[in-house]
Image (cartoon, helix red, strand yellow):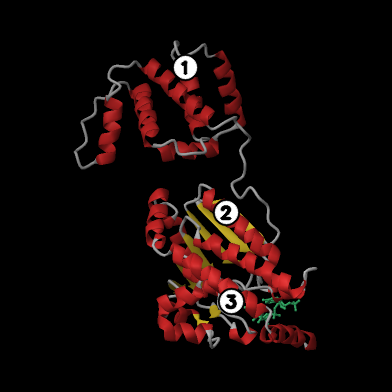
Amino acid sequence: YWLISARLMSRWCLACLKRCLLNHLHTTGSMMGATVEQFNCAKSQMGTLKKDPGNEAKLKIYALFKQATQGPCNTPKPGMLDFVGKAKWDAWNSLGSVSQEDARQQYVDLIDSLLAAEGPVVAAQPTGSAATFDTLLVSTEDNITTIRFNRPQKKNAITVEMYNEIIKALEESGKDDSVITVITGSGDFYCSGNDLTNFTKIPEGGTQQMAKDAGELLREFVKAFIDFPKPLIAVINGPAVGVSVTLLGLFEVVYATERATFHTPFSQLGQSPEGCSSYTFPKMMGNAKASEMLLFNKKLTATQACAQGLVTEVFPDSSFQTEVATRLKAYAKLPRNSLTLSKQLIRGTEKERLHTVNDQEVERLVERWLSDECMQAIMSFFQAKAKL
Ligand code: COA
């Protein structure tokens, strides 16, 4: 019944709001039974509730609705294994011989009180994130919040601004009503990792300051993933490089197109692993395979990454988006709290460990960024570009 009522939200219209307000003004209080029109308005308004009112209130709403529309409960009691049916039947039956008129009034009063608890009525907002982002597209639909990297012309390389926006988007998504959060990329790449121009913008405090600031930002960025409360799903739409790969151990599920590749060229750049990969990769794939990636820059195909446990499943590129969308929609229909609590159980035991690993990786990287090896590698990247 709750779902049916929620669907009514989409049909909810301004005319009805006006009618409801007028009816409301003309209602002289709970002593008089509500009219059928007031009852119907309350029914429509229920769909505008932003929060699930909880099982107890939902059963009461159900019972009052049945009493108001059908009168006292006289249907057979459901079997004891039909828990939901029995709870509903009990709630309806408990209203005894309350008249239909009184039931309508109680229904209207209950919906009014639930709406009042949510604050003043505001114009319907399109679903989506409250904040606007320059480097991301963030939207919420069908209980799924999607955070899409949106610098396709730069292969979704992560600038300082983008790191901050991802942290913000995760923070908001962790608190919104969505059931799962998805991260994906625009264009042909998932992400090309840290934007190397981040190293060329030297602040007033010099390179020491740059490394320190970058370290703090990275620590906060990875922390946002470690602490993210809901199931996090990566939809890898193309090649992935650097930090966008190392973070994958912090996702619940990783779906990849067969076109995706996974590359962490840290030593090539005089750097060292981050995103807790120095811990999650050996755990997932064993030391030998993790070292091939993190020390010796081995680029994996999607199929290899799947065999090594980094990727959950690989899909043909032609059907990737539709097949993944079907899975995501099904996951987003699962009970929200059950998913969150189960994630906490799975991750909870190693959360402290992950924070420690993050701190250690950042500390090492801050040193690396100031090293000659790293400076040389970054200069070579830009020199190679300049020669083209
Ligand atoms: N940092 C900064 N700029 C990047 C970038 C990065 N990580 N990745 C891609 N870009 C830029 C390119 O410089 C290029 O910019 P331009 O159009 O102004 O010249 C643009 O994005 C497109 O990239 P391009 O190199 O032309 O595309 P490609 O398909 O030939 O190669 C990559 C794509 C990702 C393989 C290549 O750009 C690359 O190796 N980037 C560096 C990846 C990296 O080392 N990341 C850090 C890991 S720690």
Q: Which residue is mark 2?
A: 171
Tag 2 near tag 3, CB within 8 Å: no
Q: Position of residue 6 (x, y in %)?
A: 47, 39
Position of 124 with respect to 3 (left or right) is right
Q: Does the rendering let one see residue 78?
A: yes
Q: Which residue is mark 3?
A: 364
Residue 233 drawn above or below residue 388: above
How packed mark 1 is, by other alpha carbons closer than 10 Å (few <14, some 14-19, many 20 or more), is some
Sequence-wise, the earlier of marks 1 and 3 is: 1
Sequence-wise, the earlier of marks 2 and 1 is: 1
Position of 144 with respect to 106 (left or right) is right
Question: Measuring 43% from the left and 14% from the top, which residue is drawn there?
Answer: 33
Q: Does the rendering let one see residue 319?
A: no
Rendered image quadrant of residue 350:
bottom left
Name the amino acid, label 1.
Thr
Q: Which residue is mark 1?
A: 35
How packed mark 3 is, by other alpha carbons closer than 10 Å (few <14, some 14-19, many 20 or more), is some
Residue 160 drawn above or below residue 104: below
Q: Position of residue 137 (x, y in %)?
A: 64, 58
Q: Secondary structure at mark 2?
A: helix
Tag 1 near tag 3, CB within 8 Å: no
